[in-house]
Amino acid sequence: MNPNFAFLNSFVDLSEETFNKLDKLSTFKRIKENTTITKTGDTPTKYYLLVSGLMRAYFNSENGKEYNKNIFSPISFVASFTALINKKPSMLTYQTLTDCKVYEFNYAEMMNLCKTDLSVCLVYSKILEQVFIGYEKRNLELLTLDATQRYLKLRTQIPNIDDLIPQYQIASYLSITPIQLSRIRKNLN
């Protein structure tokens, strides 16, 4: 069974016919490490199904400091959905942290297909639900877990994260400094 079909079927009952329609809308791409797919201020037209590698969404402060809002691991949907839905510029930059394999979708084509195909519309609805659940989960973690707990949770989600991306990226995602992360690692060892 196609793993992407299995993934989509894990949260919506999907027929092979509907999967084939979605497959025709997508383009498989390999994207190199440190590639920006959406810049702050750009109005995006695409969204991605990440099947391999790591990506991030980050915000640049006025003084140039980067704050990682999210780190995406397989299998997840990646895009500035707020910007896509509102047809407005993205407030975040989306970038690959490692070499990635993705399926790229044109958002307007997906919306056009949703108008004529209820099953595709249901898939889109479920995608948005998964994105929302992920954001809510992340916000609750920031409110309820201390830095060590957040780090351990991240290592559970992405076991080899320390070998894949620099410490400052991990620290930014955890909302701590690299020095704090270094201390947490030392205490855990």
Image (cartoon, grey):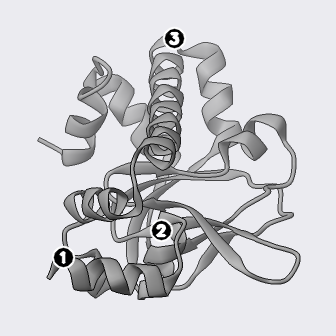
**Which label sits on residue 188?**
1
First in sequence: mark 2 vs mark 3: 2
For disc 2, the neighbor class at 10 Å (few under 14, some 14 to 19, many from 20) is many
Q: Is residue 55 above or below residue 131?
A: below
- CB atoms of marks 3 and 1 within 8 Å: no
- CB atoms of marks 1 and 2 within 8 Å: no
Q: Quadrant of residue 162?
A: bottom left
Residue sitting at x 60%, y 34%? 110
Residue sitting at x 40%, y 79%? 181
Q: Position of residue 114 (x, y in %)?
A: 60, 21
Q: In which quadrant is the N terminus drawn?
A: top left
Distance from the alpha carbon under mark 2 to that under mark 3: 31 Å
Q: In which quadrant is the C terminus drawn?
A: bottom left
Distance from the alpha carbon under mark 3 to that under mark 1: 50 Å
First in sequence: mark 1 vs mark 2: 2
Q: Is residue 150 above or below residue 99?
A: above
Residue sitting at x 28%, y 17%? 13
Please tell me how many numbered marks the rendered image carries.
3
- What residue sits right under mark 2 in the picture? 55
Q: Position of residue 87 (x, y in %)?
A: 84, 42
- What residue sits right under mark 3 in the picture? 118
Label 3 residue SS:
helix
- Residue nearer the viewer, 147 or 69: 147
Q: Amino acid at mark 3?
A: Leu
Q: Position of residue 176 (x, y in %)?
A: 52, 72
Distance from the alpha carbon under mark 1 to that under mark 2: 26 Å
